[in-house]
């Protein structure tokens, strides 16, 4: 007990002494000041941005920050550049030769307000607006905007060679996971389907079997929601779809339709698997 008391007193005295000697310690910078592009710490420096096909121009942001325990006391000026080599490096490291490779986002599909970022005095970061124009982006392609920080006038650049890939993931108001139930040629079925956005009002599901991209050309079924919530159905490529009709219930997020697929009569429903969670 005596030893415990003596130890506690010693520790208390130490804190009192260091407290007196370092009264203003938190008023001084405790770390190395650097500028960095937000995303350099993510795996593969890949950051996903979700973009709705329904938006003619979807606004997203690229963020630039500064490290340290204190915010800068003056403006910090940073310059970004595009570096497509980052896409090549990512594909080589994270994608097999049989997988879809990332490609550069076409210049017609985005606009960056400025490649110069200014972090104002007293702030720790700033955001650069990026407008994404999703029309024409293919649902089965992978797109990325490759950026890195070229320079910073006031601070050294952290991980200066790291290219951050801002991956664009498209969706629409109907895409997502559904319970797919119905009757196909007299036989009942019940499956989970991921409805992929094709454009602002069309989704694609796999009519039957497993969800493998290689099978899309033969089993892909597209469903388009018209302005009056009626449906237009068609095959993605090789699937023969005729006599298709149906409707969409926006309140319950449910599709109901009937059609002939390769001559087989199909009556089916797509019931949102996430509607109850929203």
Image (tube, grey):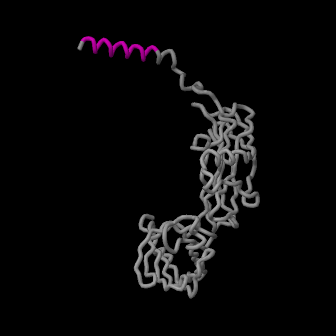
- Residue at x 71%, y 36% (from the top left corner): 76
- The residue at the point 58 percent across, 86 percent down is 242
What secondary structure do most residues of the magenta stretch adopt?
helix
In the image, taking residue 172 as reference, residue 18 lies left or right, namely left
Residue at screen point 73% across, 43% down: 80
Quarter-wise, where is residue 216 in the image?
Answer: bottom right
The mark total stands at 0
Residue 115, how many percent across, how many down? 75, 46
* Residue 97, placed above or below residue 70: below
Q: In this view of the protein, which residue sits in the foreground, 35 or 212?
A: 212
Q: Nearer the viewer, residue 17 or 31?
A: 31
Region rendered in magenta: 2-17
Residue 253 in the image: x percent, y percent? 48, 74
* Percent x, y of residue 197: 59, 68
Q: Quadrant of the C terminus?
A: bottom left
Q: In the orientation shown, which residue stands out farthest toward the bottom? A: 243
């Amino acid at each position: 007990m005596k030893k415990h008391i003596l130890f506690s007193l010693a520790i208390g005295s130490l804190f009192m002494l260091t407290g007196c000697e370092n009264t203003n310690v938190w008023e001084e910078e405790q770390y190395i000041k650097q500028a960095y592009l937000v995303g350099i710490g993510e795996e593969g420096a890949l950051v996903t941005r979700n973009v709705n096909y329904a938006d003619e121009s979807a606004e997203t942001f690229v963020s630039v920050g500064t490290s340290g325990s204190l915010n800068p006391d003056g403006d910090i000026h940073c310059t970004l550049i595009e570096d497509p080599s980052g896409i090549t490096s990512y594909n080589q490291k994270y994608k097999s030769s049989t997988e879809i490779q990332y490609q550069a986002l076409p210049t017609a599909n985005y606009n960056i307000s400025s490649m110069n970022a200014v972090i104002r005095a007293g702030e720790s970061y700033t955001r650069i607006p990026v407008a994404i124009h999703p029309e024409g982006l293919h649902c089965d392609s992978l797109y990325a905007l490759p950026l890195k920080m070229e320079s910073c006038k006031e601070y050294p650049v952290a991980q200066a060679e790291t290219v951050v890939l801002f991956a664009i993931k498209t969706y629409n108001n109907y895409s997502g996971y559904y319970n797919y139930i119905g009757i196909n040629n007299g036989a009942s079925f019940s499956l989970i389907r991921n409805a992929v956005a094709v454009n602002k009002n069309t989704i694609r599901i796999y009519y039957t079997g497993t969800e493998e991209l290689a099978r899309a050309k033969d089993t892909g079924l597209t469903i388009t929601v018209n302005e009056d919530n009626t449906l237009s159905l068609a095959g993605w490529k090789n699937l023969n779809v005729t006599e298709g009709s149906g409707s969409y219930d926006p309140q319950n997020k449910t599709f109901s339709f009937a059609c002939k697929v390769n001559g087989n009569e199909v009556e089916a429903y797509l019931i949102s698997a996430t509607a109850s969670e929203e």
